[in-house]
Image: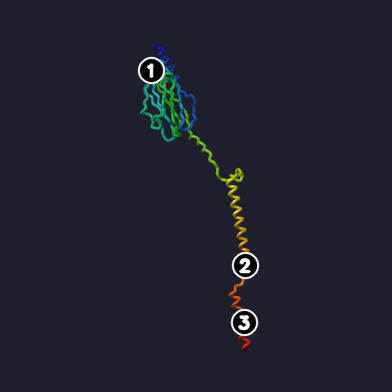
Amino acid sequence: MLLRRGLDELEVSLIFLVNVTQTSYQAEENQDITLEWTFTTNPHISSTSLNIFCELLTVLRPSVLFHLYEGIGVPESQDEQFAGRVQWDKDVLREGRLRLHVSRLRTEDSGLYKCQVATDYGRSSGRYWLNVTAARDRPEPETLNTTSSSNTTSPPRTESPGWIVLYCGLALTAAALLAAGSYWFRKRRTQREHYSPPEISGYRSADVESLTTETNQL
């Protein structure tokens, strides 16, 4: 029995693998995503010997995504970037599946995710590439264009009957005032042409008679 168990553990250690469901993910910021790794299990080994360390590898620096030590989660090891945004399924861990739910993605979450799984019967790692893009800009609501355009024509404007009557009354009044002013102007011009001040005429006649008398006396 012990020999058989030892052979099983040796076989498992030789074929211990960590796989990923897919090698890359594409997502937008503020979305949620599930990353999953699978690894070889051994029913004869306790889960307390399971150690998992997942991190995000970027050009700037690595960030701890998830840490499991001897079958127990270590949330204090998690980087502040992922604090409160990562949940893991404990129930599927015995099946050899590590499932991490990352919520409210950010663009800085983009990079290479590497998970290292270490047990008493072997160790290996699997990698994901995640690319998080900025959310698409929402189109602004269309606004009414009040400017005139050469290609568009506005519908004809209709006037109410009250405005039509008012316009007609104003036009007739203006015509009457124009006719009265023209008549008054012609009348005053005729009077000026036939008018001769009596004072001036009388003054001129007296001067002529006085001058004629003085000439005869001489």
Depth check: give the residue in front, 1 or 25: 25
Whether residue 152 is visible, yes or no, is no
- Position of 54 with respect to 166 (left or right) is left
Q: Position of residue 107 (x, y in %)?
A: 46, 34
Circle 3 SS class: helix
Would you say the residues marked 2 and 1 are in contact, meaning their CB atoms lie under 8 Å apart?
no
Q: Residue at horizontal 59%, vertical 48%?
A: 165
Q: Residue at horizontal 41%, vertical 34%?
A: 61
Label 2: which residue? Answer: 191
Front disc: 2 or 3: 3
The image quadrant where one finds the N terminus is top left
Q: Residue at horizontal 40%, vertical 13%?
A: 5
Q: CA distance from mark 2 to mark 3?
A: 30 Å
Q: How many marks?
A: 3
Q: Position of residue 76 (x, y in %)?
A: 36, 28
Circle 1 SS class: loop
Depth check: give the residue in front, 160 or 83: 160
Q: Amino acid at mark 2?
A: Gln
Q: Which mark is first along the chain, 3 or 2?
A: 2
Q: CA distance from mark 2 to mark 1?
A: 133 Å
Label 3: which residue? Answer: 209
Q: Amino acid at mark 3?
A: Glu
Front disc: 3 or 1: 3
Front disc: 2 or 1: 2
Would you say the residues marked 2 and 3 are in contact, meaning their CB atoms lie under 8 Å apart?
no
Q: Amino acid at mark 1?
A: Ser
Q: Position of residue 39 (x, y in %)?
A: 44, 21
